[in-house]
Amino acid sequence: MEELTVLQIRDFAIVAIAVMGFIVLLGNVIKTIHEWRKPGMSEAEWRGEVDRKLGSDNERIASLEDGNRVICRALIAMLSHEINGNSMDKLRAALTDLQNYLIDR
């Protein structure tokens, strides 16, 4: 059996370091390619999240618009009653609408 020389050990170390460096380089290339593709994949998720939030916001805005209409009707009925003093039926209807809105809210 031959004895290992310092040159053989050095050559082996150089080859081992080169192989490890190649493995690290290959891993970095794969990671870089994955990072390039990641924004395209996460964009679809982002769009889904935006669509969900917009749907929720549209529902809340519609609810607020309905509430504003009820409040405006009640205010108009109160002003009408205050001006001519005999719009009791409009005032009662507006009160009922306002109570229903506040209870169902």
Image (cartoon, helix red, strand yellow):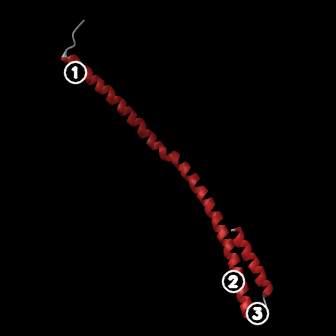
Residue 12: x %, y % from top left: 26, 20
Corner quadrant of residue 61: bottom right
- The answer to whether the residue labelled 2 contacts the one labelled 3, judged by CB atoms less than 8 Å apart, is no
Q: Give the mark nearer the N terminus: 1 vs 2.
A: 1
Classed neighbour count for the residue bearing mark 2: other residues with Cα under 10 Å, few (<14), some (14–19), many (≥20): some
In front of the other: 65 or 34 = 65
Q: Is residue 59 left or right of residue 34?
A: right
- The answer to whether the residue labelled 1 contacts the one labelled 2, judged by CB atoms less than 8 Å apart, is no
Query: Mark 3 falls on what kind of element?
Result: loop
Residue annotated with mark 1: 10
Q: How many marks?
A: 3
Q: The C terminus appears in which quarter of the rendering? A: bottom right
Q: Give the mark nearer the N terminus: 3 vs 1.
A: 1
Which residue is at 38% across, 32% downward? 26
Indicate which disc residue 85 carries: 3
Indicate which disc residue 75 carries: 2
Residue 83: x %, y % from top left: 72, 93
Q: Amino acid at mark 3?
A: Gly
